[in-house]
Amino acid sequence: MLLDDGSPARTQDLGDGTLAIDLPRGREVLVHSGTRPDLVIEPVAVCEPGPAWGLP
């Protein structure tokens, strides 16, 4: 598991599916299983027109 700068995160398995992460102030971590997900932030294509203020 890596922090936002690529350095390893210190973790502790607390059992029963619970993971403790030593996360320094102001830092971020993304927890996922399997291969690293695509982390691109971009507009989502409209598949059904709806109100401009939210989902239909």
Image (cartoon, helix red, strand yellow):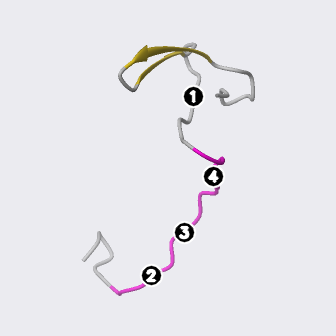
Question: Residues in magenta?
Answer: 34-49
User: SS class of the residue under badge 4?
Assistant: loop
User: SS class of the residue under badge 2?
Assistant: loop
- Disc 3 or 1, which lies upstream in sequence? 1
Label 2 or label 4, whichever lies nearer to me, is: 4
Q: Is residue 33 above or below residue 12?
A: below
Amino acid at circle 4 = Leu
Quarter the C terminus occupies: bottom left
Spot occupied by residue 54 in the image (x, y as percentages of width and height): 29, 69
Amino acid at circle 1 = Glu
| Residue closest to the eye, 13 or 22 | 13
Question: Residue 19's image quarter?
Answer: top left
Distance from Cα at disc 4 to Cα at disc 1: 14 Å
Distance from Cα at disc 2 to Cα at disc 1: 30 Å
Amino acid at circle 3 = Pro
In the rendered structure, the answer to whether residue 16 lies left or right of residue 23 reads left
Q: Main secondary structure of the magenta part?
A: loop
Distance from Cα at disc 3 to Cα at disc 1: 23 Å
Amino acid at circle 2 = Val
Residue at point 35%, 22% (across, down)? 16
Q: Is residue 46 above or below residue 53?
A: below
- Pointer 4 residue: 39
Distance from Cα at disc 3 to Cα at disc 4: 13 Å
User: SS class of the residue under badge 1?
Assistant: loop
- Disc 4 or 1, which lies upstream in sequence? 1
Residue at point 55%, 42% (across, down)? 33
- Pointer 1 residue: 28
Distance from Cα at disc 3 to Cα at disc 2: 9 Å
User: SS class of the residue under badge 3?
Assistant: loop
- Pointer 3 residue: 43
Q: Residue furthest left?
A: 56
Other residues around mark 1 within 10 Å, as few (<14) / some (14–19) / many (≥20) = few
